[in-house]
Amino acid sequence: MFRFDLAEEQLALKEMVAKFIEKEVIPVAAKYDQSSEFPFEVIKKAWELGIMNVTIPEKFGGLGLGVLDDVIVNEELGAGCLGIGTSIAVNTLALYPIILFGTDEQIKEFVVPFLESPLLASFCLTEPGAGSDAGGLTTTAVDKGDHYLVNGSKMWITNAGHASLYTVFCTMDKNAGTKGIICLAVPTDLPGISTGKHEDKMGQRASDTRAISFENVKVPKKNLIGKEGEGFKVALATLDRTRPPIAASAVGAARSALNYAVKYSKERKQFNKPISSFQAIQFMLADMSTKIESARLLCLRAGWELDQGNRKMGSFYSAHAKRHAADMAMEVATDAVQIFGGYGYTKEYPVEKIMRDVKLVQIYEGTSQIQRVVIARHLLED
Amino acid sequence: MKIVVLVKQVPDTETKIRLKGDATGIETGDVKWIISPYDEFAVEEGLKTRDAAPGSTVTVLSVGPDRCVEALRTAVAMGADHAVHVKGDTELDTYQTSKAIAEAVKKVGADLVLAGKQALDDDQAAVFGYTAEFLGMPSTSVVVKIDWSADKQSLRAHREIEGGAKEILEMPTPCLLAVNKGINTPRYASLPGIMKAKKKEIQTLTLADLGLGSEGPRVQLTEFQMPPERQAGKKLAGDASAQVTELVRLLRDEAKVL
């Protein structure tokens, strides 16, 4: 059996998020982009409507949505504002390690509070010297009997300034490479944690991005997620599941750029005709649409594979979806600006913001280059 | 308190309306269906009233083809406790629809029936009145505010009348109120609400279950026509005085406003 239609509740979910985006996000997106202020008011509303933390299992009172459902939610969020969407979606990234590898007690202690109030969490993997080479991280965790002593710093951490919980990846033994990595659930009020300034980014300016430093932070042993040495596996399993939704957010952003371009091309007249009557413009619009449609299918496929429990194929399609969606969204947004011409290059029109916003999707949660490495590894594997 | 809210499923306001080939109705193939916006206000008012009176329940009720179940599920996702679908696959007229609603309301039982002041598709504003008559309930429409007595046995319905004035009616319960825009801001269906709604049982009744169905429609829709295309605007030529003369002539002879 082969079907492309959404189930009734998935359609309802999509429409509900679309309505939220239309009423609560699009009207304020430009404001938060310009001020770079944290969109806490919007996040609170998203939380009240249950749009956040959607993958917490039903057993613990959550919605228990799968990756495919999360793909549907994130395409809509991305269609509204990638910066606000990222702020909303990062909780899922940060909580997945605990949901996937934590014990029931750990989920109750660290995850369930996110269902009770609009709290934020951050996923802390990247470091100043460890970006694409995530396995080369140097934040250390030393076994001190009843606790780990954590020292080091993290970089480009989303929601870092507003989070109540960090999931932090540290190494217990640099010589052991990725086998020395552990994942810790770290409440942000532990002594020794400090955050840097809110980075002044090119795009996704509503999202809060900071460096974090850990100085002799005592993290209780019970906060170890998974086993010692399993940390890298925890990170990869998490990223496999969040890449399709992130990719879908780029699909959403590209979809918006195309919609704006279609509308504008019908209104804008040159040589006494709407520019949409010119084949040069029509071909651009058609190519933009093909890119969006193909990327969406990859996102859905990746989500579906992961929901089926196909770990390997999930990872394979996840990397495809993230790579293709991010790159195509950058192309589509650039073409949308081109169709708008000079007007598109100004803040009077919404397409330049989309172009700045989608650039980040080619970089965060694994660059487009790293996704290709993942894909090639699958292809070349013996 | 038992509250019943009447819900009609109508084409989305952004639908491009096209007539069927024989002009007996509109093409429904590509139509996206929504809850009639006035009925959405009624659902919200029902939920608010329920929440302020512990022990109350809200039942949403819709008469129509199977697709109406989607509208009912949306209302349940917003927070309604029960949903009843009266199957009416054929084109029912106002009389038949109202009769079916009235019989279904009797079956469910109601201290308060809420509806939108009119449906957004045919704008007839007729069903609430017929239904109230069949139920023997006092009713009023264009309600923008409801003040309840402390014992919840009676209410004051504020309604808009001509010239921006308000009329306030004292009404006993049970009664039927048709509400207008502005009475509240309908809540969104939350994600958990949507997930719960899909598992909720929707009671289905047939016209036969309600002892109806033997009578044919009293009104038959014979033809639909698209509204006339809007005329392009007129541009007046000549100098200012010639334009003014022409404008006055047009206002008097063509527009007939002078």
Image: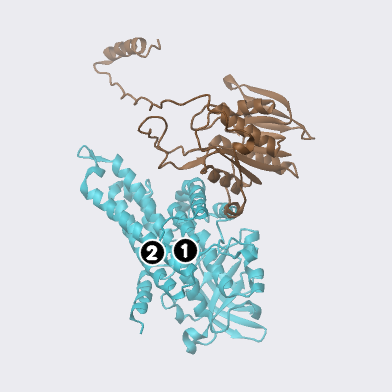
- Residue drawn where x is 47% and y is 71% of the image: A239
Query: Where does the image place residue B68, in percent across and percent down from the top left?
Result: 53, 42
Chain with cyan colouring: A
Query: Where does the image place residue A217, in percent across and percent down from the top left?
Result: 61, 77
Mark linked to residue A199: 1
Q: Amino acid at mark 2?
A: Leu
Q: Amino acid at mark 1?
A: Glu
Q: Quadrant of residue A304?
A: bottom left
Chain with brown colouring: B
B63 up-or-down from A188: above or below: above
Looking at the rendered structure, whether the residues under marks 2 and 1 are on a common chain is answered as yes
Disc 2 to disc 1, C-alpha distance: 32 Å
Q: Chain of mark 1?
A: A
Is residue B161 shown to the viewer in this render?
yes
Check disc 2 and report the residue beneath it. A298
Q: Nearer the viewer, residue A100 or A141?
A: A100
Q: Quadrant of the N terminus of chain B?
A: top right
A40 up-or-down from B216: above or below: below
Secondary structure under tag 2 reads helix
Q: Residues within 10 Å of mark 2 (few under 14, many from 20)?
A: many
Q: Nearer the viewer, residue B157 or B176?
A: B176
Secondary structure under tag 1 reads loop
Q: Nearer the viewer, residue A77 or B244?
A: A77
Q: Counting residues from the N terminus, which is met first, the one under dot 2 or under dot 1?
A: 1
Of marks 2 and 1, the one in the foreground: 2
Q: Nearer the viewer, residue B112 or B133?
A: B133
- Residue drawn where x is 42% and y is 69% of the image: A318
**Colour scheme in use:** by chain
